[in-house]
Image (cartoon, rainbow, N blue to C red):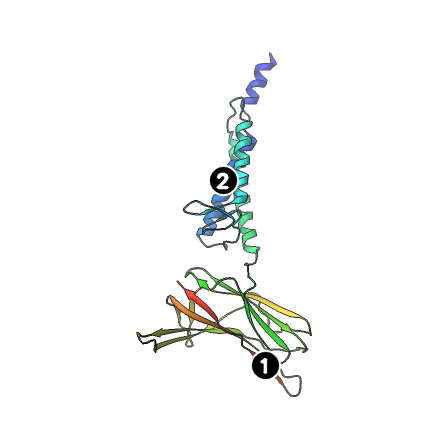
């Protein structure tokens, strides 16, 4: 007499793997919306990306990361293999699916926001008076609406800095040429960067380095405080850092100015 009741109880159970599959799909949707709304940076290509990624499959609208492909395939197989007894999705299981999707999607977003941008080994540098400023970059193309991220590393080779004044900045230059390849218009605009973790005092000892990642989205800050968007074209990115120490005689003042980096804005 207990057997029918037990069978009925089994039918009321939900397929746990189907719940996990639904939760993962919801998580991808949550993470995708956050990427689309530019709430978090697009740095988890192995999970999902809105652009073509070498770590996933392009679907025409977004890249589904290989980790997600593997997870979905495994969960689909397990769901199909354990779907016995005409199990149905209960209300509690649906709630668990939705909650898991929101939590996992938010976790993806948090991890994406915490992962530093990938900076390649391409670099330019300048050394003088016991210091070296290296500028690392992973791309020379800026798609308006995104950020071009540059990593600056200042290395103290032989000087003990106590109260330095530092300034990261640059100038983007754009030159228009006529049919005779002569310059007819020159576009110059100062670019001011604000380090994400700025401080008024940086102490360096010989052998130590200070690093910051700075991003530029195409906005030009004019001398009079105006803002505009740089028109598409070819630019040169010039960067510099100035250091001074008034506690020594003679006073230290050094300006490091690495070679320019060609940048294409499109």
Indicate which disc, 1 or 2, sits on the residue closer to the N terminus: 2
Residue 177: percent from left, percent from top? 34, 74
- Pointer 1 local density, CA inside 10 Å: few below 14, some 14–19, many at least 20: some
Instruction: Name the mark on residue 254.
Output: 1
Q: Nearer the viewer, residue 40 or 132?
A: 132
Q: Residue at x 51, y 41 (%)?
A: 69
Instruction: Name the mark on residue 245.
Output: none
Classify residue 226 by image quadrant. Answer: bottom left
Per the image, label 2 sits on a secondary structure element best described as: helix
Residue 137: percent from left, percent from top? 52, 64
Side (left or right) of 215 relative to 177: right
Classify residue 224 by image quadrant. Answer: bottom left
Q: Residue at x 52, y 69 (%)?
A: 194
Classify residue 120 by image quadrant. Answer: bottom right
Is 229 rendered above or below residue 94? below
Is 253 rendered above or below residue 90? below
**Circles 1, 2 touching at the beta carbon (< 8 Å):** no
Residue 202: percent from left, percent from top? 63, 73
Q: Which residue is mark 2?
A: 25
Residue 211: percent from left, percent from top? 60, 67
Is 234 rendered above or below residue 39? below
- Name the residue at the top extreme: 1
- Name the residue at the left extreme: 179
Per the image, label 1 sits on a secondary structure element best described as: strand
Camera-nearest label, 1 or 2 = 1
- Pointer 2 local density, CA inside 10 Å: few below 14, some 14–19, many at least 20: some
Question: Can residue 76 be seen by looking at this rendering?
Answer: yes
Q: Residue at x 66, y 75 (%)?
A: 157
**Is the N terminus in the top left, top right, bottom left or bottom right quadrant?**
top right
- Name the residue at the front extreme: 180
């Amino acid at each position: 007499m207990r057997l029918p009741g037990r069978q009925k109880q089994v039918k009321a159970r939900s397929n746990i793997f189907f719940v996990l599959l639904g939760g993962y799909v919801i998580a991808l949707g949550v993470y995708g919306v956050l990427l689309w709304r530019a709430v978090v940076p697009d740095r988890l290509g192995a999970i999902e990306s809105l652009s073509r990624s070498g770590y996933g499959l392009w679907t025409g609208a977004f890249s589904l990361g290989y980790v997600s492909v593997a997870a979905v395939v495994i969960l689909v197989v397990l769901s199909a293999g354990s779907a016995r007894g005409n199990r149905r999705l209960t209300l509690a299981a649906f709630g668990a699916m939705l909650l898991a999707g929101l939590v996992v999607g938010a976790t993806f977003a948090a991890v994406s926001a915490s992962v530093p941008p990938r900076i390649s080994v391409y670099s330019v540098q300048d050394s003088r008076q016991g210091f070296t400023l290296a500028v690392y970059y992973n791309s020379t193309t800026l798609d308006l609406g995104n950020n071009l991220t540059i990593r600056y590393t200042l290395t103290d080779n032989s000087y003990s800095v106590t109260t330095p004044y530092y300034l990261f900045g640059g100038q983007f230059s754009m030159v228009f040429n006529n049919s005779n390849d002569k310059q007819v218009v020159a576009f110059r605009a100062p670019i001011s960067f604000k380090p994400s973790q700025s401080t008024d005092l940086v102490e360096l000892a010989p052998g130590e380095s200070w690093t910051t990642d700075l991003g530029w989205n195409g906005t030009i800050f004019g001398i009079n405080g105006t803002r505009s968007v740089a028109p598409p074209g070819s630019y040169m990115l010039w960067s510099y850092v100035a250091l001074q120490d008034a506690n020594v005689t003679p006073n230290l003042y050094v300006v490091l100015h690495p070679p320019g980096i060609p940048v294409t804005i499109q």
